[in-house]
Amino acid sequence: MGNLPKSFDSQQLEPKIYSRWEKSGMFNPDKMRESLKSKGVDIEKPFTITLPPPNANGNLHLGHMCGYSFHDAIGRYMRMTGHPTLLLPGKDHAGIQTETAFTKKLKEEGKDKWEMGREEFYKQCYDFCMTNASNARDQEKKIGLSADYSREFFTLDERLTKTVYETFEMMFKDGRVYRDKRIVNICPTCKTALADIDTEHEERRGIFAYIKYPVAGKEDEYIKVATTRPETMLGDTAVAVNPDDPKYKEYIGKNVILPIQNKEIPVIADEEVDMETGTGALKVTPAHSPVDFEIGKKHKLEVVNVIDMEGCMTGEIPERFKGMSSNECSRALCKELDEQGLLVKIENIRHEVTICERCKTAVEPGISNQWYIDMSNLARGVLKTLESGEVKVIPSGQQKALEHFYENIQPWCISRQLWWGQRIPVWYSGGKKLYDWLQENEGKTVKDFEGEFNTKISGDGSIHVGEDIPDSSGVWEGETDMFDTWFSSGQWPYSTLGGPEGEDFAKYYPTQMMIHARDILFWWSARMLMLGLYRTKEVPFNTIFLTGMILASDGSKMSKSKGNGVEPQEVFEKYGADALRLWYYSDALPGSNAPIREEKIRGNRNFVNKIWNGSRFIIMNMEESEIERVSEYVVNTDVERVRLTREHIQKVSKYIEKYQFNLGAEAIREFFWHRLCDVWIEEIKDEIQEEEVGSELRVERLSELLFVLKESLRIMHPFVPFVTEGVWQELVGLGLAEGMLVEQQIEG
RNA sequence: GGGCGAUUAGCUCAGCUGGCUAGAGCAAUUCGUUUACACCGAAUAGGUCGUAGGUUCAAGUCCUACAUCGCCCACCA
């Protein structure tokens, strides 16, 4: 009976199967609830996961596919065990990263961001993102992601931005949000401030210059300092030595002359200074080094800014250096110092530098005014939930890392000098510069500011927090900075459900899980937990499941520049989505690295094909005249094969519930291939070979096989949804099954 | 400098709270089959579970040190 093709043609069938699922509406939990109700199925608690929104600035890679494969397996399992299940999809505007990517794209097209202007840039960048979002959506569907696309979000959607703004306003009122002038990392390429967490460290080549600072009032007496960044000396305001250092004891409290600038600066004593490093004397540039900034604060040193946002020399320095890049200036300075006999030597060294996480440019530490959030007591709140077990991280080793992060939480710099993102909803009466100046100079008035800068101000220096301009008086200057992208994605679990007042929020919050690769644990999950706790008084999810990292076959990171990447499309075409999914379940386990292994994916494809052919054989063995009897036959639960099948279902269910997908994948393979196909089918083949069509024994045995087949299709469906649904539909076509596999329930 | 993790067959990894005569997939070797599937079947070989101690009736499995590798965090000029 039946005439099925010899292999499961994933290329042909997967898209068809996916669109049938979509039509069924089962990915919408509201519709699913109705459907279950009409069938009289017991409805369990809803199950929700807000899916990680991929950055809408490119295509998805195998790492995204990995995460979605796990989401989907869990989602499908929950759906098949009576839970109205919501996998909520979205796309992320991804602030800096998208701005960088899009600017680069414009450049390739011969266009310039600055010529284009802010508004036009935003518009075109938006379109760029929408195109990418649409591609990403198609790819998500290719891997079989059973998400409810009727609820899809983009992080810049109005409904979502509204929630983000509310949170900011609340935090401002609470005094958690504040503006502060501190030393921050400034990326000269991205031209924006970066939070510490947005930076990386890398060993790079550099110089170590030894420079003589003449002691004031003495001939031929010098203090030698050593520095990796000579250009910052223009902003030096002290030389620090260790109080116990015999070499310099006599100079403490005296002055040295800062060369080039010809300015006297004090020699101060500070325990932080290591006598062994360099010369033991440290030049102090509070404006351009985090360490020096702290020392400067302690000793009330002047802060002299000599490098701007773009990494160019600026401020009160000799004309000839102005506008030079810091590197150019470094060279020019060394030359001049050498001519003056003040340069002792330059060593070539390798040292750790801080670089921009996105564009890998070395950051310039610099002083600037930025918006900050004090996260400390929210961090303590989350810490409690980790300790109590309310929130769990899989693998547990990463949980400790997360605890460590919360214990050492720093103020979060949330303002970015970008064009792409959500504008910080703040208005300054009389301008931002006035506001910052008044904050810095306590007791001073608007009048003082007018005097100091010789301008006329309309406005009183106050601030208004809110999306809309407070009135039309013309005194208000809108904030131009954007939010750090993580400030919006950090609110993903409730903003996508319409915020704390939303209808979906009432039904589907809190969510149950968060699944992503471990590299964004601190950026994302850590923030979602804190912000969730703040806005909703409860943690947004209880389980963080960290997938393994997908690597190139040699164990290195996949990257475009190395050309060692593998495109998902390539894998789909060669082996199909189910085969790729199985590989993730067995290889991309929490805490592990998963170098791509094509031969393993091929092996999984073979298994997928085995599922097809085992099923095909069972179907083909049934004669048309037997179908009605077989479909009505109720198998005896005492029969060994039936009993073992039940045990198998329970075992795999347990594995899924414990997130042991590797064991689940192994078990279904073992059962279907090596028990059903290799043993049971072979046994029954022999038994019924000589039997007449329609005989009691044939009907009984074929019914038994059909039972085992259907049950194992159900339990395999969360792992390999396409081929199992494909087979199920063949059964439906013959009257041996009903509906769609996606809505079937797994019997416990 | 601090934290975390890894080290089991040629390769990639399982092995949860100690009972293993140590498993899987892929690769390898031999044989078979071409009317479910060559994207197949049957079989074989391959590991003193990083090293050294310890706890225990019993240790890949727990403890301690060491070695090697990886990741994360950190302001060393």
Image (tube, coloured by chain):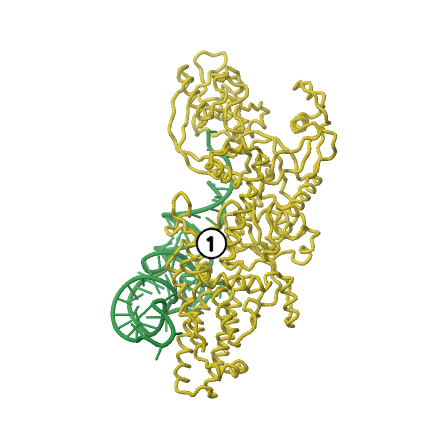
Chain colours: A yellow, B green
Of the residues shown, which amino acid type is indicated by label 1?
Gly
Q: Please give the residue where the numbered disc 1 appears in the rendered image.
A: A548
Check the residue under mark 1 and report the chain it is in: A
Q: Closest to the observer: A311 or A648?
A: A311
Residue A647 coordinates in the image, percent (x, y): 51, 74
Q: Closest to the observer: A12 or A545?
A: A12
Residue A477: image quadrant is top right
Residue A363 coordinates in the image, percent (x, y): 49, 33
- The N terminus of chain A appears in which quarter of the rendering? bottom left
Residue A591 coordinates in the image, percent (x, y): 47, 54
Q: Closest to the observer: A415 or A525?
A: A415
A701 lies above or below A102: below
Report how many numbered discs are placed on residues in the image: 1
A348 lies above or below A81: above
Residue A628 coordinates in the image, percent (x, y): 53, 82
Identity of the residue drawn at 69% across and 31% down: A428
Q: Residues within 10 Å of mark 1 (few under 14, many from 20)?
A: many
Left or right: where does residue A263 sit relative to residue B33? right
- Is residue A404 shown to the viewer in this render? no
- The C terminus of chain A appears in which quarter of the rendering? bottom right
